[in-house]
């Protein structure tokens, strides 16, 4: 009795967990799907064709695919842009956050709690609270930059969007990495130094290898947070920076389920791929995840 | 070493927060208004038209955030206790939870439409089983005035978040405390109530803060799964802000500040609560 309850509960919960993905799979390939059929009578690749992710029938050869993707249709361009912004934000946030995480993880100084609290605040306060003001600030700074003869636009540009993604990303990176540094022994660096190693070599050969697993987790968080941003990209990009969430959001208003589902699958695919590659770093026992318990 | 991070946080986040605050007080030099006033706040809270949208929106937001946080924490604790002594199932669960964490809220909101809408997968399932005959027989669980669709989306996502944290805590605690309680004659419920729950409480509370703040302030999910009236506050704030009338912009800012203050007060309350629960031992 207890065992069967256990399996029933586990089965039900697992089903609920994967149900949305099953729904996407069916919807994305469904054709003539009448109520109340659970599985459509016919399948089709129409949605994928209309999104210009796969070529028309008859052209589905390798060169057909290459030609189509090289012509950079909207979805492909959004995909590249999302990847580019996500990659930039990940790199920047790790470079910026690493020293701060080291300071917070290794040393206890006056005001540690306050600094930690300030860093966490952006994840707690709703994005509206700062993004509306930032939107106007960016426009003001653009004018100031123009007066100085620097023709850089922050509002409505990929640069501006990448910079603004740093705000929700930094807390995750710093918290995760400070958890790693809390269990890190800097004496090894001193040893390397006494053996005559230069700072860069110490970082490369001593520090980096020992924080690498945590660094992967932090980078993964950074990428995912940037990857899934809708509101910030919408407000700061002013509709001109079209990433995947932008496309999915406007598709969601159309009610075309096949296209929405196909876009959703494209949107979750890279994240799942990255997770599969890095999942060994993400075990529940890893010290990096512990960073969250310290809020 | 802290400087680069603090520059980002201070200039981009707190700077913009401050500028937003100024705007909400009516400071708009580009249209020639430099006086400070509380007009926008007064309008949001008491103006008949806006107040009729603000207060229902506030109750809806509080309801959605509380229910989502509480239910997902409860499910996560139940699941974690159920599977913590298994090996394969636990490994699989942690993997699934991580998978769910990677899926953006926007995608989940859309997924809920496909599952729970009146022509969605579950409606079809009941239809095939002959329980209902037409989509209209299926209750409106998405785009409903009680935010059920929104809550379902959040639960789906946050169970995974709580699950990872609770499983990690349980793992680090081991079973010794409970074994002692059991040998002293405590039954299953007593062991949970007086031993396990207090031990996981600190981690659970800080996770709850994050989840509550998140579900209270996120825009995408209620935009896709919500109705025209009542609207959750983040959606309402953006509606005001994107209104072509520049006065409405101040009101959008004011509303955003009100949301921020509510979240902040609740966070402080939680922290005070955590400090009390943790230091009891």
Image (tube, rainbow, N blue to C red):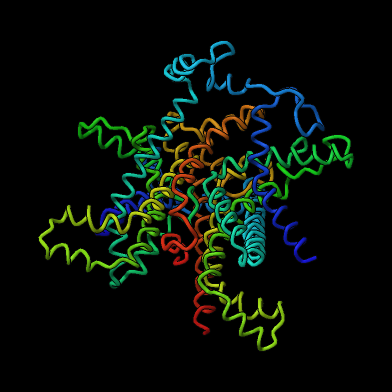
Looking at the image, residue A111 lies above or below residue B46: below
Q: In the current view of this chain or complex, which residue is farthest to the bottom?
A: B184
Q: In the displayed structure, does residue A131 sit left or right of residue B177? A: left
The image quadrant that residue A132 belongs to is: top left
Picture quarter with the N terminus of chain B: bottom left
The residue positioned farthest toward the top in the image shown: A58
Q: Is residue A273 above or below residue B281?
A: above
Residue B89, x across and y down, in percent? 62, 58
What residue sits 64% from the left and 53% below the top? B155
The reply to whether residue B35 is visible in this rendering is no
Asked which quadrant contains residue B6, the reply is bottom left
Q: Is residue B170 left or right of residue A30?
A: left
Please state the horizontal and vertical placement of residue A278, each as a whole percent of the image: 44, 48
Q: Position of residue B206 (x, y in %)?
A: 51, 66
> Is A293 in front, or is B244?
A293
Which of the 4 quarters of the picture holds residue B200? bottom right
**Residue A210 percent across, percent down from the top left:** 30, 59
Residue at image coords 62%, 23%: A47
Residue drawn where x is 22% and y is 69% of the image: A187
Q: Is residue A95 visible?
A: yes
Q: Nearer the viewer, residue B204 or B96?
A: B96
Q: Is residue B130 left or right of residue B242?
A: right
Instruction: Determine the residue positioned at 59% across, 49% down.
Output: B233
- Exactly how many numbered labels are in the figure? 0
View extreme (left): residue: A196
Front-most of residues B157 and B266: B157
Q: Is residue B131 left or right of residue B5?
A: right
């Amino acid at each position: 009795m207890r065992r069967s309850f256990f399996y029933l509960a586990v089965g039900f919960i697992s089903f609920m967990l994967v149900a949305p993905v099953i729904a996407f799979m069916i919807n994305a390939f469904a054709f003539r799907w009448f109520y109340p059929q659970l599985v459509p009578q016919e399948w089709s690749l129409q949605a994928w064709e209309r999104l210009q992710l796969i070529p028309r029938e008859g052209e589905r050869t390798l060169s057909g695919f290459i030609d189509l993707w090289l012509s950079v249709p909207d979805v492909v361009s959004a995909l590249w842009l999302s990847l580019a912004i996500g990659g930039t934000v990940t790199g920047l946030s790790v470079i910026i956050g690493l020293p701060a995480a080291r300071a917070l993880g290794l040393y206890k100084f006056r005001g540690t709690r306050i600094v930690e609290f300030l860093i966490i605040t952006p994840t707690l306060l709703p994005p509206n609270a700062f993004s509306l003001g930032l939107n106007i600030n960016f426009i003001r700074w653009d004018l100031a930059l123009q007066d100085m003869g620097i023709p850089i636009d922050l509002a409505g540009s990929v640069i501006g969007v990448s910079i603004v993604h740093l705000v929700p990303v930094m807390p995750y990176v710093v918290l995760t990495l400070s958890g790693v540094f809390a269990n890190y022994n800097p004496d090894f660096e001193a040893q390397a130094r006494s053996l005559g190693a230069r700072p860069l070599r110490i970082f490369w050969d001593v520090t980096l290898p020992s924080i690498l697993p945590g660094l992967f987790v932090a980078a993964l968080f950074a990428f995912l947070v940037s990857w899934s941003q809708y509101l910030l990209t919408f407000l700061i990009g002013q509709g001109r920076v079209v990433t995947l969430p932008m496309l999915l959001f406007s598709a969601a208003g159309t009610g075309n389920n096949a296209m929405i589902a196909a876009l959703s699958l494209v949107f979750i695919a890279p994240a799942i791929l990255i997770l599969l590659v890095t999942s060994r770093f993400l075990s529940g026992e890893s010290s990096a995840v512990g960073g969250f318990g310290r809020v | 070493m802290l400087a680069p991070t603090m520059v980002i946080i201070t200039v981009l986040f707190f700077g913009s927060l401050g500028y937003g605050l100024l705007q909400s007080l009516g400071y708009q030099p580009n249209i020639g208004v430099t006086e400070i006033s509380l007009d926008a706040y007064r309008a949001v809270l008491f103006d008949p038209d806006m107040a009729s949208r603000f207060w229902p929106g506030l109750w809806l937001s509080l309801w959605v955030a509380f229910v989502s946080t509480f239910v997902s924490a409860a499910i996560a604790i139940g699941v974690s206790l159920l599977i913590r002594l298994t090996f394969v199932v636990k490994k699989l669960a942690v993997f699934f939870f991580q998978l769910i964490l990677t899926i953006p809220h926007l995608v989940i909101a859309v997924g809920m439409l496909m599952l729970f809408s009146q022509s969605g997968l579950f409606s079809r399932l009941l239809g095939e089983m002959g329980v209902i005959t037409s989509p209209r027989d299926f209750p409106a669980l998405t785009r409903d005035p009680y935010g059920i669709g929104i809550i379902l989306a959040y639960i789906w996502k946050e169970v995974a978040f709580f699950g990872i944290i609770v499983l990690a805590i349980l793992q680090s605690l081991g079973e010794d405390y409970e074994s002692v309680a059991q040998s002293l004659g405590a039954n299953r419920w007593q062991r949970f109530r007086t031993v396990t729950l207090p031990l996981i409480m600190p981690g659970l509370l800080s996770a709850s803060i994050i989840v509550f703040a998140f579900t209270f302030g996120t825009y995408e999910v209620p935009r896709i799964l919500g109705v025209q009236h009542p609207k959750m506050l983040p959606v309402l704030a953006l509606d005001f802000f994107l209104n072509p009338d520049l006065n409405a912009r101040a009101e959008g800012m004011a509303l955003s500040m009100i949301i921020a203050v509510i979240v902040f007060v609740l966070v402080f309350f939680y922290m005070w609560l955590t400090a009390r629960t943790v230091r009891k031992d």
